[in-house]
Image: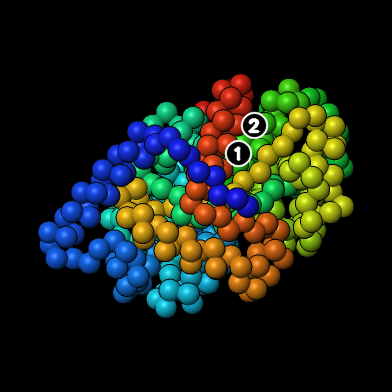
Amino acid sequence: MTAVKNPIETPAQGRRSLLGAALAGSAVAAGLPSGAAWAQSFPAKPVRLICPFPAGGAVDIASRAIAAELSKLLGQPVTVDNRAGAGGNVGLAELVKAPGDGYTLFMTTSGIQAINPSLYRKMPADPNKEMVPVSALVSLNNVLVLHPSVPARDVKEFTALLRASPGKINYASSGSGTSIHMSAEMFKYLTKTFMTHIPYRGSAPALTDLMGGQVQAMFDNIPSALPHIKAGRLKALATTGARRDPALPDLPTIAEAGVQGYESGVWFGLSVPASTPKELVKRLADESIKATKSPDFVKRVSELGYNVIGSTPEQMEKMIQDELKRWPPVIKASGATAD
């Protein structure tokens, strides 16, 4: 990938530049090392990685995979701290309270950056102003899965079932505003059908209830659903990307199955508080990119259905801006909201 340079400084970037200058001035006055020296000496203690979703879900799996590699590269433990709830907003609130010293990282998602601000009436913080990107790590598609008892063998039959019994099918998500939620809302919007949304605090508890029959459908991230599909505990109908997914090559995409214009996916990446010095952001980005190139990391996540990215901060910022153009119109058209 080629880094995208933005010659125009946004108001948020201007504020960060002023804040960075103020921090640098304070550091000099206090006799502390410069930003560059600070970045080189970092880290001197363990690093915390906030995962805003519960253990066992796709975001948590990616968080633990990158934490293992960063621990090797940084020479300090990188520990995962699960702070789940409100589609990632609980973790976001925790992140913005942390100092910008590099010792608190955040596993953000394209949903947190571009869906939540349009879906939630009240946000704990603006993810596009109060934190800055470090590196987009992985992307993945979702998969439409059903409880085996649901009498639908493909997308066409599932759509017909929804039309015949509107509101009788409940679908689970990992929380309002997540890609899992919005993948279902996009499906509803394009097929003109209705399902009842049942939000959970992450993929793992949602999958538990789906397999138990308490809910009937889910557009889950492939990595967390894949073991249950292979074991026959869930019935997979189609994947949500523009092309067939390598992890489930025999499944059609939802668009291939007849829902024209359908495409939905998600990516995960590291962010830090906006007050973090840019030299330290670069150091973290460099180490994160190295981590995504590790054979152990690539093998671990590829086998689970992730696609490796490993971007620069500038490339991740471009990805965020692309998502901000894409999702708000879909949310408005679908009428989806979150409490």
Frontmost residue, 224 versus 20: 20
Q: Which residue is mark 1?
A: 181
Q: Quadrant of residue 186?
A: top right
Q: Quadrant of residue 310?
A: bottom right
Determine crowd level at label 1: few under 14, some 14-19, many 20+ residues with C-alpha closer than 10 A: many
**Label 2, label 1: how far apart the Cα atoms are:** 6 Å
Identified at 25% across, 46% down, the residue is 19
Q: Which residue is mark 2?
A: 185
Asked whether the beta carbons under mark 2 and mark 1 sit within 8 Å of each other, the answer is: yes
Up/down of 121 relative to 39, above or below? above
Say which amino acid is labelled 1: His
Determine crowd level at label 2: few under 14, some 14-19, many 20+ residues with C-alpha closer than 10 A: many
Identified at 48% across, 39% down, the residue is 6
Image location (x, y in percent) of residue 77: 41, 74
Say which amino acid is labelled 2: Glu
Identified at 35% across, 70% down, the residue is 40
Up/down of 266 relative to 49, above or below? above
Q: Is residue 65 left or right of residue 226?
A: left
Quadrant of the drawing holding the C terminus: top left
Identified at 65% across, 67% down, the residue is 298
